Structure formats: structure tokens, C-alpha cells
Amino acid sequence: MARYGFTFPFDGLPLHAHRDALREAERLGYSDAWSYEIDGVDCFTPLALAAAWTDGLRLGTAIANVYTRAPLTLAMSAMAVAEAAPGRAMLGIGAGSSVIVERWNGVAFEKPYGRVRDMASLLRRAFAGEKVSETLDTLAVDGMRLSRHGLAPPPNLYIAALREKMLMLAGAESDGAIINWLGADDVPKAVQAARRGAERAGKDPAQVEVICRIFVCMSEDDALVDFLGRRAVAAYLTVPVYAKFHEWLGRGEQLRPMWEAWAAGDRKAATAAIPRGTVDELLVHGSADACRRKIQAYIDAGVTVPVLNFLPAAAEPAERARQSLEMLRRLAPGSV
């Protein structure tokens, strides 16, 4: 297996305290470190620090939102990481959700497919050194150019995708798809869609990378796993884009009671309505050996870059950080 990654910043660990952890991850054989942004830190600052602290880790965003940054701002941020870590930068873009875009940022969540498509098009041209003047369906620029072009290789571009149309776009118009919140048995459906997109665009479908964020709680405390898993599933899968995603995957009937209770405002009933089997499908948990087997199942199903997202079980930040780092060590690629 060529690449094996993790999500950071780690829960409970301040950014300034990540140097030793990132260096250890590199020594342990991890190839990729992928940042994220929800409501904590932005996705580019952690990569800038990792660029200075590590020598070989590939550094990516999963994801940078296409609504909350203008095309030039997004291109400049990505190229700054590319300059800081030549040949190691990866830019994952995506639409996010109405919660993040509309409720938290006050931006209309309109035409997400078109917005991602148009942003990808503008970024590719900017990274190629073009002076771009273009009016597209969702974006328009006039004379956009990166003045520092040529100082470093541009980042590889990836598109976060859930359902078929966006997955096909990822396969056609980027280096690969970023997927998350699905089980190993769901992976082939996503992979096939991305490869169809590549094939229709005249690309080799076998070259499409599939980056998958895999949620991991290395615990054998079944009651604790059940509690954490239900809470996480309810938090994500009640968001409209994820609800539609799981309908597409075939979980509509399983999750309908949760959605109905959530819509009625009964959060307790919503979490109780989640089938335990759904928790087991979407959350890697158990002993270190059990977690390794479940991670391998994703790889066997077609994931080319597994990206572990550690879910610690503690409430206190220092203990959350300790648990995250323990999972990083015990689930390192050489142990899988």
C-alpha cells in the first residue's frame, strides 16, 4: 500500500503542540496528513505548520469550502502551502453543507454541484499560470492570475463527493474523490461512480484516487462505543446532504425513524432510533486488531488512501489528546 493518512489537528491537542506528533507520524510510516475545518481552526494553518515540521508527509485539505473563500483567495492559500511544502501539497475542495455555509457563514447554499465544478475549473487554470477571465454559472473572475506562479509545483486537486453526480465530477475533473461517512461495503458504489466519470472524460479510471476519511474509536467498551457512535451518526446524518447520501446508499428505511424524530425536535428519540448495525457499519471500533481488520476492509473495497479520523472517548482535553495519539501509534500503517 503506497499511502496511508490521518486527520489532524488531533482532538484536545493545541496546534502549537503538534510538532512531535507529526514527526512521530512520519517516522511511523504515515504518508498523508489531512486537515479539516468545521468550527475550530481553518484548514490551511495546520498545513503550514506541518510543512515546517516534517520532511515527507503529503499535506492536504479535506476540505476547503468553495463557498466561504473566493477563487483567488482559495488559489493563493493552496499555493502558499505548495511553496511551503514543494511537491507535497494537496487541495481537497467541496461544497460542505447548508449548516456550515448558510447557518454559520451566512452564504446562500445554492447550486453546490455547479459551484464545485466552476471552482475546480478556475483553480486548475490558475494553477497552470493562466490569466483567467471567465463568467461561469456560479462564479465569475476578471483577470485573475497568481503572480508567484512557478515557484513550486501546484497542489494536486481533489473533490469531496457524496452522490453519483459529484463523484463522477471528481473522477473527470480532479485527481480523485474524497469520501467519508460510509461503510466498507458502501465503498465500491462510490468508487465505480468516480471511475465512470474518469472514463467518460477520457482518463484512465484506474488512476483515480479515492481518499476516504475513516472514523475510528479504538475501544472495546461496547456501551461507550454505542453512545459515541449514535451521537456522531445523528450529528452528521441528519444534515440534508448526508441524509440524501445515505438514501442513495440504500439506508433510507433504516434511518427514516431517526430523521423523523430529529425533525420533530426529539433528539433523544432520534439517537435511540439509529440501528446499532448502522453504528457498526460506519464507525471502526474495538481492539487494535479489530480496527486494523476493519480499516483493511475499506482498502480491499477500493479505497486508495485511507485517512484515519480518531474519535477519542474522554471528556477532558488532555486525555482526548492522549487517546488520539495512542490510536495514531497503534494503528500505524506498518501494523495494518
Image (cartoon, rainbow, N blue to C red):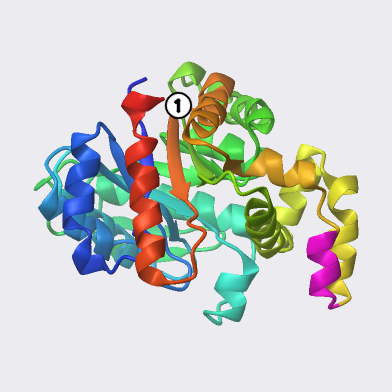
- Which corner quadrant of the image does residue 70 belong to? bottom left
**Residue 251, image quadrant:** top right
- Magenta: main secondary structure equals helix
Does the magenta-highlighted stretch encompass residue 268? yes
Q: Position of residue 235 (x, y in %)?
A: 66, 64
Residue 88 visible in image? no
Question: Depth check: 13 or 203 in front?
Answer: 13
The location of residue 163, given as percent across then percent down, is 68, 43
Left or right of 21 on screen, residue 7:
right
SS for callout 1: loop
What's the residue at 30%, 58% (across, down)? Answer: 75
- Residue 178 lies, in percent from the top left, at 50, 42
Residue for badge 1: 304
Toward the bottom, the furthest residue is: 106
Q: Nearer the viewer, residue 130 or 199?
A: 199
Q: What are the residue bounds of the magenta stretch?
A: 265-272
Q: Quadrant of the C terminus?
A: top left
